[in-house]
Image (cartoon, coloured by chain):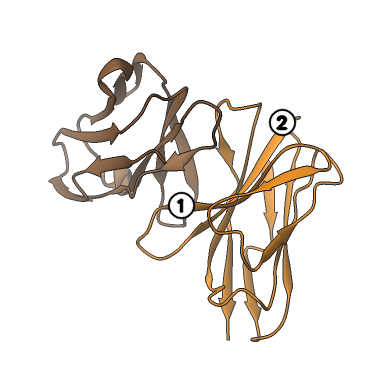
Chain colours: A brown, B orange
Amino acid sequence: GIQVEQSPPDLILQEGANSTLRCNFSDSVNNLQWFHQNPWGQLINLFYIPSGTKQNGRLSATTVATERYSLLYISSSQTTDSGVYFCAVVPPGNDMRFGAGTRLTVKP
Amino acid sequence: DGGITQSPKYLFRKEGQNVTLSCEQNLNHDAMYWYRQDPGQGLRLIYYSQIVNDFQKGDIAEGYSVSREKKESFPLTVTSAQKNPTAFYLCASSIGAGELFFGEGSRLTVL
């Protein structure tokens, strides 16, 4: 089955810093989503981005489907950005598969 | 408000007991899913259903059962056959294979 690799596995930032999270996938996909899991376990939808670039406030994402990767950019990080960021993909004719996540800690 | 409601949020169970987790959605989504998350890990698919009265096994279906009698509801039963049931369980729904939305999760602890 498809492999979804996220990097880095852990990231520690000082408040105000910028960061880039990466998601590589091993096969073509129909859909790709980025989620933020907060400390209470809830998964928050960040982006639905099978291709192209989207922006939402301090967050933006780019997916290059032909090269099988997606990037999540966080600018001017805040302590509330802490948590785990998951990339998830849907291969053709299949169900959603998750990466192992990037654990982000933003220190004040 | 439209959304996905999971209950209970916390559940304790003795070994050998079956337990059923509820998942209800009012988003008019066709597809519903159950995922399991262990501490520090990603999500793994247990079961999914694309239409009423039909469902398919995911990667870790052993020891679990589901039903899909109504479009809005997709309950998950954790049976006594599940060897390590303590985990965080997440229900999700989507329109077809489109954007996935999650409930707040149910945390099951086996004593």
Name the quadrant containing residue A49.
top left
Task: Please give the name of the residue rendered at 63% of the width and 78% of the height, measured from the top-left corner.
Answer: B12
- Disc 2 element: loop
Q: Is residue B53 left or right of residue A61?
A: right
Q: Is residue A2 left or right of residue B84?
A: left
Q: Using the image as rendered, state which of residue B81 and residue A39 is in the foreground.
A: B81
Name the quadrant containing residue A35.
top left
Task: Please give the name of the residue rendered at 44% of the width and 64% of the height, measured from the top-left corner.
Answer: B38
The chain carrying label 1 is: B
Task: Please give the name of the residue rendered at 46% of the width and 57% of the height, measured from the top-left corner.
Answer: A40
x and y percent of residue B104 in the render?
A: 58, 51
Relative to B93, does residue B47 appear above or below in the rendering? Answer: below
The quadrant of the rendering that contains the C terminus of chain B is bottom right
Q: Which residue is mark 1?
A: B43
Res. B3 visible in picture? no
Count all numbered tags in the image, as a single digit. 2
Res. B41 visible in picture? yes
Q: Which residue is mark 2?
A: B29
Task: Please give the name of the residue rendered at 68% of the width and 78% of the height, measured from the top-left corner.
Answer: B80
Relative to A28, does residue B71 appear above or below in the rendering? Answer: below
Q: Using the image as rendered, state which of residue B54 and residue A55 is in the foreground.
A: B54
Three-letter amino acid code at the position of disc 1: Leu
Relative to A77, does residue A66 appear above or below in the rendering? Answer: above
Mark 1, other Cα within 10 Å: few <14 / some 14–19 / many ≥20: many
x and y percent of residue B91 in the render?
A: 62, 49
Mark 1 and mark 2 lie on one chain; the one further toward the N terminus is 2
Tell me whether marks 1 and 2 sit on the same chain: yes
Relative to A91, does residue B11 appear above or below in the rendering? Answer: below
